[in-house]
Image: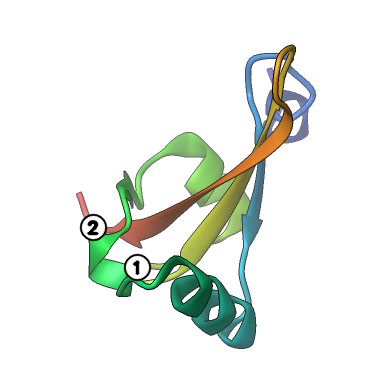
Amino acid sequence: MSEKEIFTHELVPGHKILMKNESQKILKELDITASQLPKIHDTDPTIEIIGAKTGDIIEITRDSPTAGKTKYYRIVTPE
């Protein structure tokens, strides 16, 4: 499976690196600090493919048959 094909698989949700201003907005809306976000390792295949670096905040968009599209946030950490 090629790198691009990974994101077309039905079990792999969309991943997006947030820009700094987007990250600050999300953290403010959630009233948390970046260190309080769940973590995702920099060696995760999706993180490597999108080119995220340690400290980046990732927006993960999942499809749910009951809730529609939901967004989750993770901070990239070293393994």
Q: Say which residue appears at 38% left-offset and 73% top-offset.
A: 31
Is label 2 in a helix, a strand or a loop?
loop
Q: Say which residue appears at 53% left-offset and 76% top-offset.
A: 23
- Answer left or right for 3 relative to 68: left
| Disc 2/disc 1 C-alpha distance (Å) | 6 Å
Residue 10 image position (x, y, % from top left): 73, 14
* Total numbered badges shown on the rendered structure: 2
Residue 76, compared with residue 5, is above or below; it is below
Residue 54 - label: 1
Residue 20 image position (x, y, % from top left): 56, 85
- Answer left or right for 34 relative to 62: left
Question: What's the coloring here?
Answer: rainbow
Residue 56, compared with residue 3, is above or below; it is below
Of the pair 75 and 49, the residue shown nearer to us:
75
Residue 63, compared with residue 31, is above or below; it is above
Residue 21, quarter of picture:
bottom right
Of the pair 77 and 57, the residue shown nearer to us:
57
Q: Say which residue appears at 37% left-offset and 60% top-offset.
A: 75
Residue 37, quarter of picture:
bottom left
Residue 33 - label: none
Residue 61 image position (x, y, % from top left): 67, 40
Residue count near mark 1 (Cα–Cα under 10 Å), binned few <14, some 14–19, many ≥20: some
Residue count near mark 2 (Cα–Cα under 10 Å), binned few <14, some 14–19, many ≥20: few
Q: Hey, what amino acid is under mark 1?
A: Thr
Residue 2 image position (x, y, % from top left): 71, 26
| First along the sequence among labels 2 and 1 | 1
Is label 1 in a helix, a strand or a loop?
loop
Q: Are marks 2 and 1 in contact (CB under 8 Å)?
A: yes
Quarter of the image where the N terminus is located: top right
Residue position marked by numbered label 2 in the rendering: 78
Q: Hey, what amino acid is under mark 2?
A: Pro
